[in-house]
Image (cartoon, grey):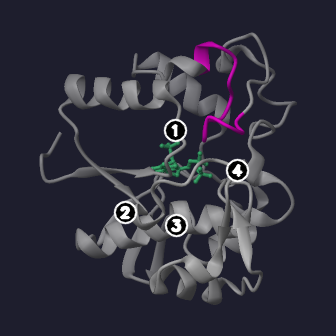
Amino acid sequence: MNKEVKAIVIDHFMHFDETWEFIERVKKEWGVSVVVKGNERLKGHKYGDVVKVSELSREDREELQRLGYNREEFVFALNNIAGNHLLKTVPLKEAVKDLKIDALIVGVRWDENPARASETFFSPREDPPHTRVHTILLFTERDIWEFTLGNRLPVHPLYYKGYRSLDDKYETKKVSDKPAWEQNLENTPERVGRAQDKGNIMEILRRHGYM
Ligand SMILES: Nc1ncnc2c1ncn2[C@@H]1O[C@H](COP(=O)(O)OS(=O)(=O)O)[C@@H](OP(=O)(O)O)[C@H]1O
């Protein structure tokens, strides 16, 4: 892999241990250069803590204002708009800015969520200015597994254990005892084990820079 190409991992402080082990393994085996970026201003909070907006840094308060969030508190978790935005989108935007990234390749797909269904392959963004490059928009979940297993690509160990779509360790649920690729991919929802997909959270988050 070209050493100039960097992979960015957004650390929302709630990844599974297996996710970090997997990242280390891929780094070593594939020689991928990985940059880890989190919202360090929020480090130290624990999952479920109630965070007061008035105690946030100016940057984070401004981010919540832009989002139209006007409550006084939010829960430190990914299942709500404020927590998710500050822990994922904000560090992502800061990484794009700090690393002076022109093009960010993101693995979102049309069929994952209605909020992603009209995404384009090259998607210009303003805050900060860059282009999102969505190379696998047209893949189905089945296509992903056929490509991954067919080419013997490394597989995150939790997919063997019945998880179907992975995010944080507190709220991502295992949905079967079968490996992800042996599940009924065509007739059951891929992201049912994901808290942040409830309601229209994803749509609002995406308007503000979410993946
Ligand atoms: N923590 C973190 N760090 C860096 N990049 C990330 C992260 N989470 C999601 N992504 C990117 O978003 C793509 C879609 O994955 P998900 O649908 O699981 O994302 S999300 O959690 O709803 O954003 C995902 O594509 P894949 O890596 O192909 O799954 C990534 O490009």
Crowdedness near tag 4: few (<14), some (14–19) or many (≥20) residues, C-alpha within 10 Å: few
Q: Is residue 153 above or below residue 58?
A: above
Residue closest to the eye, 74 or 111 = 74
Image quadrant where one finds the N terminus: top left
Q: Secondary structure at mark 1?
A: loop
Residue 139: x and y, percent? 60, 42
**Can I make out residue 120 in this image?**
no
Crowdedness near tag 3: few (<14), some (14–19) or many (≥20) residues, C-alpha within 10 Å: many
Which residue is located at x 46 percent, y 53 percent? 135
Distance from label 4 to label 3 (Cα)?
Answer: 19 Å
Judging by the rendered image, the residue that carries numbered circle 1 is 15
Residue 82: x and y, percent? 67, 70
Which residue is located at x 64 percent, y 78 percent? 53
First in sequence: mark 3 or mark 1?
Answer: 1
Which residue is located at x 77 percent, y 27 percent? 185
Q: Is residue 105 above or below residue 90?
A: above
Judging by the rendered image, the residue that carries numbered circle 4 is 48
The reply to whether callout 1 and callout 2 are in contact (CB within 8 Å) is no
Distance from label 4 to label 1 (Cα)?
Answer: 15 Å
Judging by the rendered image, the residue that carries numbered circle 2 is 104
Does the residue tagged 2 have its C-beta within 8 Å of any atom of ligand 1? no
Q: Nearer the viewer, mark 4 or mark 3?
A: 4
Magenta stretch: helix, strand or loop mostly: loop
First in sequence: mark 2 or mark 4?
Answer: 4
Q: Nearer the viewer, mark 1 or mark 2?
A: 1
Residue 210: x and y, percent? 57, 66
Judging by the rendered image, the residue that carries numbered circle 3 is 89
> Looking at numbered disc 4 in the image, what kind of residue is underneath it?
Gly
First in sequence: mark 4 or mark 3?
Answer: 4
Does the residue tagged 1 have its C-beta within 8 Å of any atom of ligand 1? yes
